[in-house]
Image (cartoon, rainbow, N blue to C red):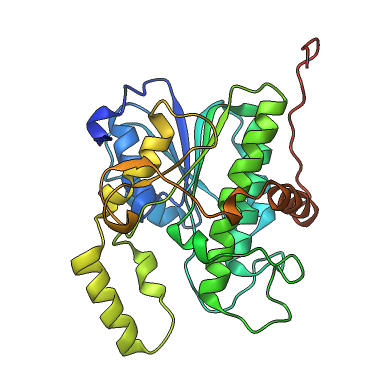
Amino acid sequence: MTTFSTGQIPAMHSRTVVITGANSGIGRAAARALAARGARVVLAVRDTTKGQAAAATMDGETLVRRLDLADLASVRAFAEGFQDPIDVLINNAGLMVPPLGRTADGFELQIGTNHLGHFALTNLLLPQITGRVVTVSSGGHRAGAIDFDDLNWERKPYRAFRAYAQSKLANLLFTAELQRRLTEVASPVRALAAHPGLAATNLLGHLDGDPLRRRLVHTIAVNFLAQSEEDGALPTLYAAVADLPGGSFAGPGGLLQGRGAPKLVGRSKAAQDEVTARRLWRVSEELTGVRFPLRVPSGSER
């Protein structure tokens, strides 16, 4: 039985970890835990003032760099401006059920930020990643479906949770196809995914519906069901440092996978669809203009 805790994070000296959205929530908790173990942690955040405030609460070496995942120009600028080797990239930042919005490039805000921004970032940084790519999904992926005919909610009525679920399913399909491609080119890098369960983070403040209903749901979730940011970060940390195979999906092992010590968990049938994963990858390349950069090493036998 898994009993993983922050005390089991190995010494991380001389290792660099990049974490998106590390100024709050589980990203901040993961950054704090890794920095405390000696890692050089890069907080890749949209608001550098908030990033600096978060970094000031952490022991160890931290860097704050601007990254707006809802703007591909910002993603490219971050990748061009950070040329150091990266041991672990944690694709953590995300939006949950905001009102309908568009990224700088015209994508629906959740698929654009949660998936396409991280898709571009990962592929741009991949030549310098030496260890792992950990992408944070959600149990909400089980309600998701990839609508290739209207991926960006331009024709059908907008449903915020359905859009969120689609983006979280995309995170798992991306992880699966990334691992397939890494294996194909004999790369030692591993792609893994994690979900925090129900964590008491600021994401819970964006629920749809009547304000009174939102407050009631938020109060019940935070006080009776949700775990802390620190506990919510454990599956991410488990995926980042534990001896797990590529393609693994980590999440809480307790009640309804909403809380508890992290372990390897299952995923929906849709998240295991290799045909959809490959198609989503091709569409993501077309939308972002970013492609998988690695090739089979010269002289390798396949």
Residues 180 and 203: in front is: 180
| Residue 163 as seen in the image, left or right of residue 257 | right
From this viewpoint, which residue is outermost toward the front? 269
Name the residue located 54 percent from the left edge and 31 percent from the top edge.
246
In depth, the one of 263 and 24 nearer the eye is 263
Quarter of the figure that contains the C terminus: top right
Residue 167 in the image: state x and y as whole percent: 58, 61
Q: Is residue 130 above or below residue 300?
A: below
Going by the picture, which residue comes out furthest to the left? 223
At x 25%, y 36%, the residue is 5
- Location of residue 117 in the rendering, given as x and y in whole percent from the top left corner: 62, 53
* Res 129 seen here: yes
Q: At which x and y percent is residue 123?
A: 67, 40
Could you tell me if residue 78 is visible in this image?
A: no
At 26% from the left edge and 45% from the top edge, which residue is drawn? 57
Rendered image quadrant of residue 166: bottom right
Give the tally of numbered discs. Answer: 0
Q: Image check: 124 left or right of 91? A: right
Q: Is residue 205 above or below residue 83?
A: below
Q: Which quadrant: the N terminus?
A: top left
Question: Dividing the picture into quarters, in which one does residue 73 lie?
Answer: bottom right
Query: Looking at the image, is 161 positioned above or below residue 120?
Result: below
* Residue 25 relative to residue 297: left or right: left
What's the residue at 77%, 12% (across, down)?
300
Q: Which of the pair 72/138 is nearer the observer?
A: 138
Please say if 157 is above or below 279: below
Q: Quadrant of residue 235?
A: top left
From the top left corner, tell me how far across and down residue 58 is, in percent: 28, 41
